[in-house]
Image: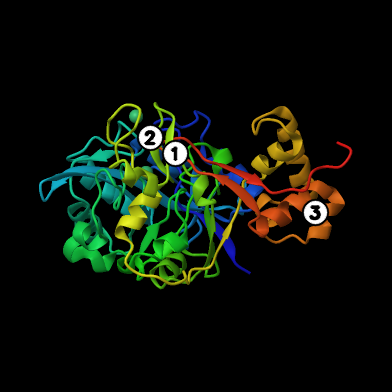
Amino acid sequence: MGFFADFHVHSRYSRSTSPGLELSELARWAEIKGIGVVGSGDFTHPSWFRSLETNLTDCASGLFSLKQNHRSIHFILSSEISLIYKQNGKVRKVHLLLLAPSLATVEKINASLGRRFNLRADGRPILGASARDISAEILAIDDRVMIIPAHIWTPWFSLLGSRSGFDSLEECFEDLSPNIHAVETGLSADPPMLAKVSSLRRFTVLSNSDAHSAQNLGREANELDCPLTYDGIARAIRCGEVVRTIEFFPEEGKYHHDGHRQCAISLTPAAAREMADICPVCGKPLTLGVLHRVEDLADVRGESLRPFSYQIPLRQVLAQLLHCGENSKKVGRSYFSLIERLGPEFSIMQSLAFQTIAAADERLAVAVRAMRENRVRRIPGFDGVYGKIILDLPRASGG
Ligand SMILES: [Zn+2]
Ligand SMILES: [Zn+2]
């Protein structure tokens, strides 16, 4: 029996995160969602690192659990770093996700980076160094650290992004490219989009939530079936032994289409190209989204071999069924009552038999079937605006 893992989350020390984002809150939501392994997030931040040391106990496997409660949830030491630098005459902005095997390794990484950079300013620190050089520095400390380019397609701050990225991982990591084994899709992309670029085919595809609040844990995730240890997980990532990824419908991500948020302009890549990528309202360059960038770099046809399933957050499904906001009290009540009766969100959305769901809530069973069969209407996100995914449901008879 496999387990779900979400490696990329943040703590309350990262910008624009919720102040209650503590380890116990992450573990509580991991239980509600049915996620067995969660990233610690932000291990480079001195205060968060102290909190990791104080609250976590090593399960003698390179994974950790809370000392006090939710002890079935395992944490893996993780952090995201933001690199801003010049390479080949262009400004590059790249986010990398790090996974580390021990607190001792993290301590050494923090000491090494902390000599030159301010790690205290942000849970996701900005480092003025190249992805290649930082990777060399980290791998020299411990070559078991996993370095994973984060949300590789988003226009800003990603390895292949339209604004400040590269055209390939090899161009970015140069001689260290063989040490990179996996990439993260990001919310606006899915495995079939990645499969269109031949240079990406050798990489394991991972999907994570990049959650800035505990509620958003597992928006995207990975199903693994490997020993529940750091080395087991690292080996599965290195060898591409991921059972499947759990994906947002990519149109829901904030950067799927091209456009301008200020000008309320959203365009397909073809429509944007017709306008020479210039906004018809303000005359400035459009923010080119993930789909555009994928089309620019695409060089192969054929199906993705990476198994994956789309998933819509249960709260969002309930909001559609109950005709009220996702964060409304009504949705909240219904959500927790369903979790109590049916178990974790991931099993409701992915595996529970329809008749079991129907016994608790008939309309939810119909909605989950529509989601599992990908029967949805999609309104793509653009330039920082989330898209909308609307389940294709039969009209309720008699209200
Ligand atoms: Zn990021
Ligand atoms: Zn504009």
Asked if marks 2 and 1 touch (Cβ < 8 Å), the reply is: yes
Between residue 234 and residue 107, name the one nearer to us: 234
Location of residue 63 in the rendering, given as x and y in whole percent from the top left corner? 48, 57
Quote the CA–CA distance across marks 2 and 3.
Answer: 43 Å
Pick whichever of labels 2 and 3 is earlier in the sequence.
2
In the image, the residue with mark 2 has its CB under 8 Å from the nearest atom of ligand 1: no
Name the secondary structure under disc 3.
Answer: helix
Colouring chosen for the image of the structure: rainbow
Q: Which mark is residue 47?
A: 2
Callout 1, which amino acid? Ser
User: Can the viewer see residue 101 in this picture?
Assistant: no
Location of residue 299 in the rendering, given as x and y in whole percent from the top left corner? 32, 66
Name the secondary structure under disc 2.
Answer: helix
Between residue 390 and residue 141, name the one nearer to us: 390
User: Can the viewer see residue 375 in this picture?
Assistant: yes
Callout 3, which amino acid? Ile
Q: Which mark is residue 51?
A: 1
Quote the CA–CA distance across marks 3 and 1.
Answer: 39 Å
Residue 142, quarter of picture: bottom left
Q: Which mark is residue 357?
A: 3
In the image, the residue with mark 1 has its CB under 8 Å from the nearest atom of ligand 1: no
